[in-house]
Image: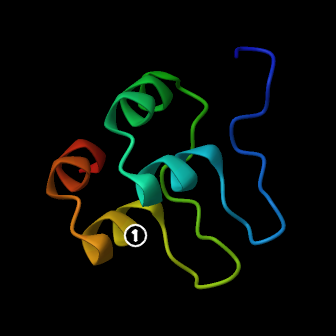
């Protein structure tokens, strides 16, 4: 995983962190946040939401806490 760009985006501007947040994958999020090169403030291009705003909107309270 260290050789991959974890901030790479799909065609809607979603990063791996955004995908994990939207699906509620807490263990994946924990691992991604351990990396110093992950940008937790990246806004997707479709809705302009950050991972934190997605977590709050969906209601993933535990993930909101992790991202804060």
What residue lies at 15% left-to-right and 57% top-to-bottom?
A: 61
Q: Taking 48 as reference, is 59 left or right?
A: left
Residue 66 on image: x %, y %:
24, 42
Residue 14, located in which quarter of the rendered image?
bottom right
How many numbered circles are shown? 1
Classify 3 as above or below 61: above
Asked if 65 appears above or below 34 in the picture, the reply is below
Residue sitting at x 52%, y 23%: 35
Q: Element under label 1?
A: helix
Q: Percent from the top left, x then y, of residue 29? A: 41, 36
Q: Residue at x 32, y 37 (%)?
A: 26
The single residue placed furthest to the top in the displayed view is 2
Left/right placement of residue 30 relative to residue 3 reads: left
Q: Pick the quarter of the image with the N terminus.
A: top right
**Front in this rendered view, residue 60 or 51:** 60
Q: Tell me: 14 left or right of 22.
A: right
Q: Is residue 27 left or right of residue 43?
A: left
Viewer-proximal residue, 19 or 67? Answer: 19
**Residue labelled with disc 1:** 54
Q: Residue at x 57, y 37 (%)?
A: 38
Q: Looking at this rendering, what residue extends furthest in the bottom direction?
A: 47
């Amino acid at each position: 995983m260290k050789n991959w760009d974890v901030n790479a985006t799909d065609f809607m501007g979603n990063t791996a962190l955004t995908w994990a947040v939207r699906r509620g994958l807490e263990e994946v999020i924990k691992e991604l946040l351990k990396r110093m090169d992950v940008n937790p403030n990246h806004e997707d291009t479709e809705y302009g939401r950050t991972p934190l705003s997605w977590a709050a909107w969906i209601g993933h309270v535990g993930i909101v806490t992790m991202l804060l």
